Image: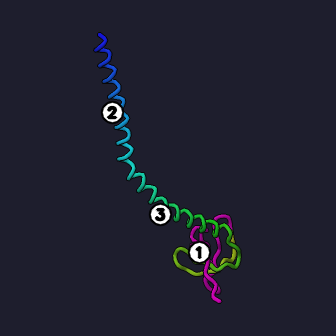
Amino acid sequence: MFGLVWAMGAAGQQQVAAGQGDMLTTVVQFAPMILIFFVFYLLIIRPQQKKQRAVQDMVANLKKGDKVITSSGMYAVVTAIKKNTVVLKISDNTKVEFLKSAVSGLQKSEK
């Protein structure tokens, strides 16, 4: 009887050890995927978020007289700012209303 209990205890300990080994194997198998996601985050996602945040800050700080470039590639001067839109002067007699999100950048000053 004592031999049977001893054998069952040894088998149970082997199963626990095998279960821990399986968990380690699973972690090792997922490590490359985790590493790839981390590299993608550092090289692609994070810089894109920083760029988007910078554009949002620039759009939020637009003021009358700023020279801007729209997402369609037009150069213009801000003449008025409304809640969600800006009025842009494209030429002497042409003013067009754009969404603020259509402004993609400030025109670099030529000195």
The x, y position of residue 56, in whole percent, is 61, 65
In what element is the residue under mark 1? strand
Q: Residues within 10 Å of mark 1 (few under 14, many from 20)?
A: some
The front one of 52 and 71 is 52
On screen, residue 78 above or below 19: below
Q: Which residue is mark 3?
A: 44
Q: How is colour applied across the structure in the image? A: rainbow
Q: Which residue is mark 2?
A: 18
1 and 3 marks in contact (CB < 8 Å): no
Residue at the spot x=62%, y=85% of the render? 91
In what element is the residue under mark 2? helix
Picture quadrant where residue 52 is located:
bottom right
Q: Residues within 10 Å of mark 2 (few under 14, many from 20)?
A: few
**Which amino acid type is shown beneath numbered disc 2?**
Ala
The front one of 66 and 38 is 38
Asked if the stretch drawn in magenta spans residue 100, the answer is yes
Q: What is the number of the mark on residue 105?
A: 1
Q: Earlier in the sequence, mark 1 or mark 2?
A: 2
The x, y position of residue 42, in whole percent, is 49, 61
**Residue that sits furthest to the bottom in the current view:** 111
**Which amino acid type is shown beneath numbered disc 1?**
Gly
Measure the C-alpha gap from mark 3 to mark 2.
39 Å
Asked if the stretch drawn in magenta spans residue 42, the answer is no
Badge nearest the viewer, 3 or 2 = 2
The x, y position of residue 65, in whole percent, is 70, 79
In what element is the residue under mark 3? helix
On screen, residue 18 above or below 46: above
Measure the C-alpha gap from mark 1 to mark 2.
59 Å
For the N terminus, the quadrant is top left
Picture quadrant where residue 12 is located:
top left
Region rendered in magenta: 82-111
